[in-house]
């Protein structure tokens, strides 16, 4: 059995060089691979091309830290914690700091699925009169200069099984094959078999679409233990390149069954991210000022973390228990 | 009983949800509306989210559609591929009701949740089309929450994120999509529906305390108001459930403020 356990520093150094095309797992404020994203920021890796469907705290932080030069996205925000959109995500677009391309969630998810299946595209039903179809964020010259990108944002095709002249028109979405997908899961073994508890979102498709996969996990368990109940596993070991045990590795986002999202910290982030100077303070305090995730958790405080512990039956911390 | 326009808005949407409906929810007030329906008028309705939580119990109000609170007591926990399949599948799709929100709506119910100003360098950027654009295209019925403001009810969207009633229904049929059976826009002052002949929005109901003229003044395009009737106010029981069962901590629904002196 190959032992793929490594530190966040080593995993990022090895698999996320500058200019990589990456995809980030999780959803808005749930199971964001924060420990891995912090490490990308600490190593000041630049010029990343990011693919996400609905993201999220990690996405916002990465954009704000200046690591992202282009993004393909359906929804940028942290739900109720930034109802008008992710704060640094919005600023980056409003100030023209990043290239961006808008898709819908279904389109992004099928793009990952196409990548996972090794198909050049997948068709879907849809409406071509929207601006999602008509307006391109990446212009033709950017696309043609970048061999990793398809020449078109979207295209249409006719159902080849319909009688001639009566063909249904479908939208074709181009496959995504990121260099690396970063995920945070509840359990993994040293070889890379992964268990996600609760909703998988599009993590499995994102993992399978990528050339490399880095998984951070709450708990590293033995091969024997994870294979005792394989019905509950979703990602096979041979597509995983690095296994990075990071307890509270999704904080301040939630990790079902382990801990809830940290309302106080997300609100603090919202305040600090609103201004360039205080956002830099945030980065200095929580990312650059900490050596690693354990150090970051010291900044958050053991007491705060303790209060986030999930009720094991519910998977979250009931609000009625809070003061 | 004293109630807020936000409570009225959530309850008006809840009244549009029936048993057997499969409800696709976004974040915020649309979750409150779906939960209210389940507690009040449609206990057998099914709530699901694009994230893959299907038939969620929702003991506590989630703050995101990916919240661990949507993963409890479900029939299955899946992912996004599954949820979009439910919306499109010929068996389940027609039963779905999508509850959405947006920054702008046009006379045909098309929505903008992407930006204000030029797309490439917007004056104000929002989260984006997300799953709402897909749900608007696929769902059997569509309910959209809006604030009743002239700047939000516009003749022309700054960016067209999600499709409403088609100006040319042939386009949808050609795309293999059927027409949503019904589309509604529910605001803090009124309910709008769409004319089946010309596809345009008209005022269907105005809330107690407003008039059709006052509502029309907060619509930035020509709006038919002559069919409008006054909506019946929420019952004491509906308000009680909303405040005590659904959002007891006031996370989404604000309480009426004490009268100013």
Image (cartoon, helix red, strand yellow):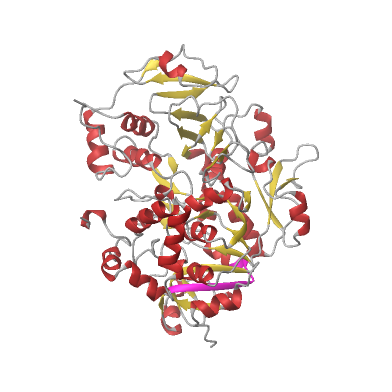
Q: Quadrant of the C terminus of chain A?
A: bottom left
Determine whether, in the image, residue B149 is placed left or right of residue B63.
right
Residue found farthest to the right: A164
Q: How many marks on residues?
A: 0
Q: Residue at x 54, y 16 (%)?
A: B222
The answer to whether residue B37 is magenta is: no
Q: Quadrant of residue B247?
A: top left
Read off the magenta span.
A208-217
Whether residue A199 is visible to the viewer of this picture, yes or no, is no
Taking A11 as reference, is A283 above or below it?
Answer: above
> Residue A226's x, y, as percent?
43, 78
Nearest the eye: A217 or A238: A217
Q: In x, y percent, where is residue A126? A: 64, 42
> Residue at point 59% right, 34% down?
B158
Q: Which residue lies most toward the front here?
A: A277
Left or right of A269: which side holds A169? Answer: right
Residue A205 position in % (x across, y down)? 57, 63
Name the one closer to the observer, A237 or A55.
A55
Chief SS of the magenta region: strand
Asked where in the image residue A22 lies, by quadrant, the reply is bottom right
């Amino acid at each position: 059995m190959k032992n793929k356990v490594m530190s966040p520093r080593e995993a990022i150094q090895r698999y996320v060089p500058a200019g990589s095309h990456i995809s980030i797992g999780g959803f808005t404020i749930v199971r964001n691979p924060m420990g891995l994203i912090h490490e990308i920021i600490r190593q000041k890796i630049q010029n990343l091309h990011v693919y996400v469907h609905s993201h999220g705290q990690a996405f916002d932080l990465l954009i704000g830290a200046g690591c992202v030069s282009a993004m393909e996205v359906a929804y940028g925000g942290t739900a109720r914690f930034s109802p008008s959109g992710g704060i640094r995500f919005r600023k980056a677009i409003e100030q023209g700091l990043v290239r961006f391309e808008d898709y819908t969630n279904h389109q992004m998810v099928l793009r990952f699925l196409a990548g996972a299946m090794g198909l050049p595209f997948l068709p879907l039903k849809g409406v071509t009169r929207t601006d999602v179809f008509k307006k391109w964020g990446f212009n033709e010259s950017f696309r043609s200069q970048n061999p990793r990108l398809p020449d078109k944002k979207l295209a249409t095709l006719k159902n080849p099984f319909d009688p001639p002249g009566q063909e249904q028109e479908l939208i074709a979405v181009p496959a995504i094959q990121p260099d690396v997908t970063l995920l945070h899961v509840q359990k993994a073994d040293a070889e890379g078999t992964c268990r996600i508890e609760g909703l998988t979102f599009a993590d499995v498709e994102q993992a399978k679409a990528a050339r490399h996969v880095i998984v951070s996990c709450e708990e590293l368990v033995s091969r024997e233990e994870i294979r005792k109940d394989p019905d509950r596993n979703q990602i096979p070991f041979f597509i995983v390149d690095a296994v990075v045990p990071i307890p509270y590795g999704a904080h301040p986002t939630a990790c079902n069954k382990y801990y809830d999202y940290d309302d106080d910290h997300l609100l603090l982030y919202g305040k600090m991210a609103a201004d360039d100077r205080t956002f830099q303070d945030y980065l200095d305090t929580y990312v650059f000022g900490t050596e690693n995730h354990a150090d970051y958790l010291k900044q958050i405080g053991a007491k705060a973390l303790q209060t986030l512990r999930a009720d094991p039956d519910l998977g979250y911390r009931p609000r009625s228990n809070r003061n | 009983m004293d109630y807020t326009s936000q409570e009225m808005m959530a309850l008006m949407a809840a009244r549009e949800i029936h048993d057997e409906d499969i409800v696709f929810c976004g974040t915020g007030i649309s979750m409150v509306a779906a939960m209210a329906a389940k507690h009040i008028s449609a206990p057998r309705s099914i709530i699901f989210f694009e994230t893959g939580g299907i038939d969620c119990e929702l003991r506590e109000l989630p703050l995101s559609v990916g919240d661990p609170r949507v993963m409890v007591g479900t029939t299955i926990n899946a992912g996004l591929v599954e949820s979009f399949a439910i919306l499109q599948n010929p068996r389940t799709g027609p039963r779905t009701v999508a509850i959405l929100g947006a920054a702008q709506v046009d006379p045909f119910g098309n929505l903008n949740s992407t930006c204000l100003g030029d797309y490439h360098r917007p004056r104000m950027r929002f989260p984006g089309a997300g799953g709402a654009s897909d749900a608007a295209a696929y769902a059997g019925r569509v309910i959209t929450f809006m604030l009743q403001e002239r700047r939000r009810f516009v003749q022309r969207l700054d960016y067209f994120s999600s499709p409403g009633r088609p100006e040319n229904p042939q386009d949808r049929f050609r795309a293999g999509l059927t027409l949503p059976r019904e589309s509604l826009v529910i605001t803090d002052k009124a309910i709008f529906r769409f004319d089946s002949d010309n596809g345009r929005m008209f005022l269907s109901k105005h809330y107690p305390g407003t008039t059709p003229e006052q509502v029309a003044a907060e619509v930035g395009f020509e709006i038919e108001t002559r069919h409008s009737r006054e909506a019946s106010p929420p019952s004491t029981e509906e308000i009680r459930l909303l405040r005590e069962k659904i959002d007891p901590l006031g996370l989404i629904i604000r309480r009426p403020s004490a009268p100013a002196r």
